C-alpha cells in the first residue's frame, strides 16, 4: 500500500512540475526552435506545414509530461544538442499552440 501511495504522489508531482515549468518557459524561443528544427522534418513525414502531426486523430502525446518526453526524444534522436531549457521552451510552445494541456 505504501508503494502505491508513493507512486501516485510521484506521478502527481511529475505532472505538476511539468506544468509549472511551462509557466517559466520562453514561448518566443520555443516557437523559433520548433520552426527551425521541427517543421521541415514533420512536413516531410506528414506533408503540408507539418502541423498535422500535432493535430492528427491518433497522436502519442496525451499529457504535458509526455510532450516534454517526446520533445526530448526528438532532441536526442536528431542530435540537436538542445539544453533542457530549450526542450521545455519548445514543449511549452507546442502545448500553447496545439495541445493545450492544463497549466
Image (cartoon, helix red, strand yellow):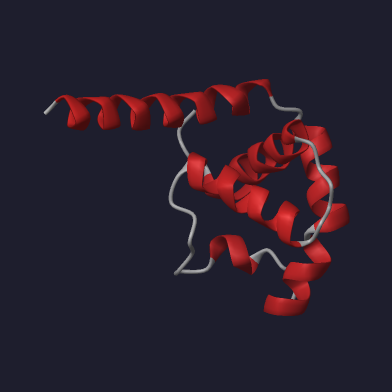
Residue 10 sits in quarter: top left
Residue 54 sits in quarter: bottom right
Q: Residue at x 69, y 40 (%)?
A: 93
- Residue 60 in percent (x, y) is at 48, 61
In this rendering, the count of numbered labels is: 0
Which quarter shows the N terminus?
A: top left
Asked whether 51 or 45 is in front, the reply is 45
Q: Is residue 49 visible?
A: no
Q: Residue at x 19, y 32 (%)?
A: 4
Horizontal side of 86 relative to 1 (left or right) equals right
- Residue 25 in percent (x, y) is at 70, 27
Q: Residue at x 75, y 75 (%)?
A: 48
Horizontal side of 78 relative to 6 (left or right) equals right
Q: Residue at x 77, y 37 (%)?
A: 86
| 26 in relation to 79, above or below | above
| 54 in relation to 29, above or below | below
Horizontal side of 63 relative to 90 (left or right) equals left
Residue 11 sits in quarter: top left
Amino acid at each position: 500500500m505504501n508503494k502505491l501511495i508513493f507512486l501516485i504522489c510521484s506521478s502527481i508531482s511529475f505532472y505538476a512540475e511539468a506544468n509549472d515549468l511551462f509557466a517559466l518557459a520562453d514561448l518566443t524561443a520555443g516557437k523559433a526552435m520548433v520552426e527551425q528544427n521541427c517543421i521541415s522534418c514533420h512536413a516531410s513525414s506528414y506533408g503540408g506545414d507539418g502541423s498535422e502531426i500535432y493535430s492528427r486523430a491518433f497522436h502519442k502525446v496525451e499529457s504535458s509530461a509526455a510532450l516534454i518526453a517526446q520533445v526530448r526524444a526528438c532532441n536526442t534522436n536528431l542530435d540537436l544538442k538542445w539544453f533542457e531549457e530549450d526542450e521545455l521552451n519548445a514543449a511549452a510552445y507546442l502545448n500553447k499552440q496545439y495541445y493545450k494541456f492544463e497549466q
